[in-house]
Image (cartoon, helix red, strand yellow):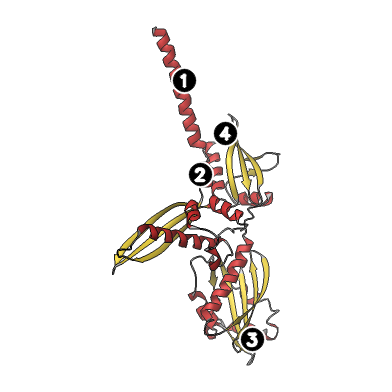
């Protein structure tokens, strides 16, 4: 009987060890967080009267709706008035990964709170895909802006402090804007360069001025004024791509300089987003192999995949005492995937049919 009990205890011990191994293995190599990458909206303020009709749930509902509006404005080219028709509150709740009230106070019978809302990126992308809307990677960018105002009736050129667009440009910025603008210094030499080239200003490349600033991306904005009508010639270099745009504006009581600046900035934001579009209809399967004995390397890889916006999903497909095999779905081309690893501390070997991490 003692031997039987001993055998039974040994069997139980073996099962216990196997169970522990199972837990440790899946703790170490779980990719359950792969689809939990988030987009965060911070410092979202909600203010409501604090009276008998006050409802905390209604405050949270409004915070979620405003947060959703901000993230959609940040990652798509949709206009604000089209967002409310895109989704209902129930769907917004399903896309929220987490939220927190970071501050709340009561002032003069008002409840004022600040929220932080995180959206599950993969769920959000899947939802946008169903709506046939391609998001873009929300990449912030500093660029040089050279704004000129030319009065076609007097042929006068307004530069720098004489130009209201120059003076007011950086006063108006919205939370979802990704572009930040560096305005040139009021330089006498630059003024003379522009005056010298005024007769062919539309063809002039502005390289003499641009070269003074250590920056690759720039926008030349030339506004031609005829009474209350403005024709805008926009020549931009963004991510080494040349862009030329013509736009028209009418200055009126309802169309102030603030409106025109916001309109122009919206155009620039959309051009920038188009260069960073994520074609979520592309589902490129990629297989990667990692040495299973190199735990640190597998963790580095998972962290890298987690951070890449173009990685739709990934999981461990196979594991043995030599290799861990990852299956990845990527929303772009093989070359783009290779480039994403080029500047990292992870070496990607593509010489064999199954790529490997070294």
| Furthest residue in direction front, as rendered | 53
Mark 1 / mark 3, whichever is N-terminal = 1
Mark 4 / mark 1, whichever is N-terminal = 1
Tally of numbered discs: 4
Q: Quadrant of residue 192?
A: bottom right
In front: label 2 or label 3:
2
Q: Position of residue 156 (x, y in %)?
A: 61, 90
Q: Position of residue 97 (x, y in %)?
A: 47, 50
Position of 341 compared to 66: left or right?
Answer: right
Q: Nearer the viewer, residue 344 or 28?
A: 28
In front: label 4 or label 1:
1
Spatial distance from mark 4 to mark 1, Cα to Cα?
23 Å
- Disc assigned to residue 195: 3
- Circle 1 is placed at which residue position? 14
Spatial distance from mark 4 to mark 2, Cα to Cα?
20 Å
| Furthest residue in direction top, as rendered | 1
- Circle 2 is placed at which residue position? 33
Tell me whether circle 1 and circle 3 mark residues in contact (CB < 8 Å): no
Position of 339 compared to 66: left or right?
Answer: right
Q: Residues within 10 Å of mark 3 (few under 14, many from 20)?
A: few
Spatial distance from mark 2 to mark 1, Cα to Cα?
30 Å
């Amino acid at each position: 009987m003692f031997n039987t009990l001993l055998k039974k205890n040994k069997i139980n011990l073996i099962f216990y060890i196997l169970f522990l191994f199972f837990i440790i293995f899946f703790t170490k190599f779980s990719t359950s967080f792969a689809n939990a990458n988030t987009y965060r909206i911070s410092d979202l303020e909600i203010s409501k009267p604090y009276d008998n009709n006050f409802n905390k749930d209604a405050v949270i509902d409004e915070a979620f709706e405003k947060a959703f509006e901000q993230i959609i404005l940040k990652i798509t080219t949709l206009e604000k008035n089209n967002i409310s028709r895109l989704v209902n509150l129930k769907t917004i709740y399903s896309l929220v990964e987490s939220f927190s009230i970071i501050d709340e106070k009561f002032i003069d019978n008002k409840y004022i709170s600040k929220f932080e809302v995180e959206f599950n990126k993969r769920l959000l992308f899947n939802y946008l895909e169903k709506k046939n809307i391609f998001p873009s990677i929300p990449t912030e960018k500093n660029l040089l802006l050279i704004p000129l105002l030319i009065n076609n009736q007097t042929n006068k050129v307004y530069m720098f402090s004489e130009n209201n667009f120059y003076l007011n440009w950086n006063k108006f910025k919205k939370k979802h804007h990704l572009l930040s603008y560096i305005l040139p210094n009021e330089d006498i030499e630059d003024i003379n360069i522009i005056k010298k080239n005024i007769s062919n200003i539309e063809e002039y490349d502005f390289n003499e001025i641009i070269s003074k600033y250590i920056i690759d991306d720039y926008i030349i904005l030339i506004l031609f004024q005829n009474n209350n009508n403005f024709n805008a010639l926009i020549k931009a270099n963004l991510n080494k791509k040349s862009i030329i745009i013509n736009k028209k504006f009418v200055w009126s009581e309802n169309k102030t300089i603030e409106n025109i600046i916001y309109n122009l900035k919206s155009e620039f934001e959309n051009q920038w987003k188009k260069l960073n579009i994520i074609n979520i209809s592309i589902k490129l399967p990629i297989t990667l192999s990692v040495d299973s004995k190199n735990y640190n390397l597998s963790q580095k890889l998972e962290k890298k995949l987690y951070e890449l916006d173009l990685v739709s999903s990934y999981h461990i497909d196979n594991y043995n005492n030599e290799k861990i095999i990852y299956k990845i779905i990527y929303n772009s081309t093989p070359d783009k995937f290779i480039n994403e690893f080029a500047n990292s501390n992870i070496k990607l070997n593509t010489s064999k049919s199954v790529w490997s991490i070294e």
